């Protein structure tokens, strides 16, 4: 991992913004809309989504695995709760 670039929080937020702009995966846009409709400001919701994304990025880097869209979706659906924090 020493030669690999570690994604920063800003990079994760940028990735989420790109996912929103592309509409792919659609669940990202759906999650943003749901969070905003329940009173979460956009500038708070996007970093929440980036947290869910970071779980996948970390797993890919740590385990040389593949991005798990199903788990990403599950973590997005759980927002604003962050159940993965219990694992830390």
Image (cartoon, rainbow, N blue to C red):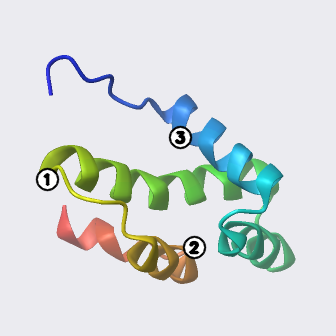
Q: What crowding class fits label 2: few (fewer than 14 Cα within 10 Å), some (14-19), or many (20 or more)?
A: some
- Badge number at residue 43: none
Is 1 positioned to the left or the right of 51 in the image? Answer: left
Residue on which disc 3 sits: 12
Residue on which disc 1 sits: 63
Which of the two discs, 2 and 3, sits closer to the camera? Answer: 3
Say which of 43 and 10 sits in front: 10
- Alpha-carbon span between mark 2 and mark 1: 26 Å
Residue on which disc 2 sits: 80
Q: Secondary structure at mark 1?
A: helix
Locate the C terminus and report the quarter of the image it occupies: bottom left
Is 2 positioned to the left or the right of 31 in the image? Answer: left
Is 8 positioned to the left or the right of 44 in the image? Answer: left
Question: In percent of the image, x 31 and y 70: which residue is there?
Answer: 84
- Alpha-carbon span between mark 3 and mark 1: 19 Å
Q: Quadrant of residue 79?
A: bottom right
Q: What crowding class fits label 1: few (fewer than 14 Cα within 10 Å), some (14-19), or many (20 or more)?
A: few
Say which of 8 and 19 sits in front: 19
Question: In percent of the image, x 55 and y 74: which residue is there?
Answer: 76
Q: Secondary structure at mark 2?
A: loop
**Marks 2 and 3: CB-CB under 8 Å?**
no
The earlier-in-sequence mark between 3 and 1 is 3
Is 56 positioned to the left or the right of 4 in the image? Answer: right
Q: Which x, y percent locates residue 54?
A: 41, 51
The earlier-in-sequence mark between 2 and 3 is 3
Question: In percent of the image, x 43 and y 80: which residue is there?
Answer: 70
Question: In percent of the image, x 54 and y 51: which residue is there?
Answer: 50
**Marks 2 and 1: CB-CB under 8 Å?**
no
Locate the N terminus and report the quarter of the image it occupies: top left
Depicted 62 relative to depicted 29: above or below: above
**Marks 3 and 1: CB-CB under 8 Å?**
no
Q: Secondary structure at mark 3?
A: helix
């Amino acid at each position: 991992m020493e030669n690999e670039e570690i994604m920063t929080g800003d990079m994760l937020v940028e990735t989420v913004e790109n996912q929103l702009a592309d509409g792919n995966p659609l669940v990202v846009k759906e999650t943003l809309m749901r969070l905003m409709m329940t009173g979460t400001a956009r500038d708070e919701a996007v970093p929440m989504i980036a947290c869910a994304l970071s779980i996948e990025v970390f797993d890919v880097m740590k385990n040389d695995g593949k991005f798990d869209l199903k788990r990403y979706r599950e973590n997005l659906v759980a927002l604003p709760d962050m159940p993965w924090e219990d694992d830390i």
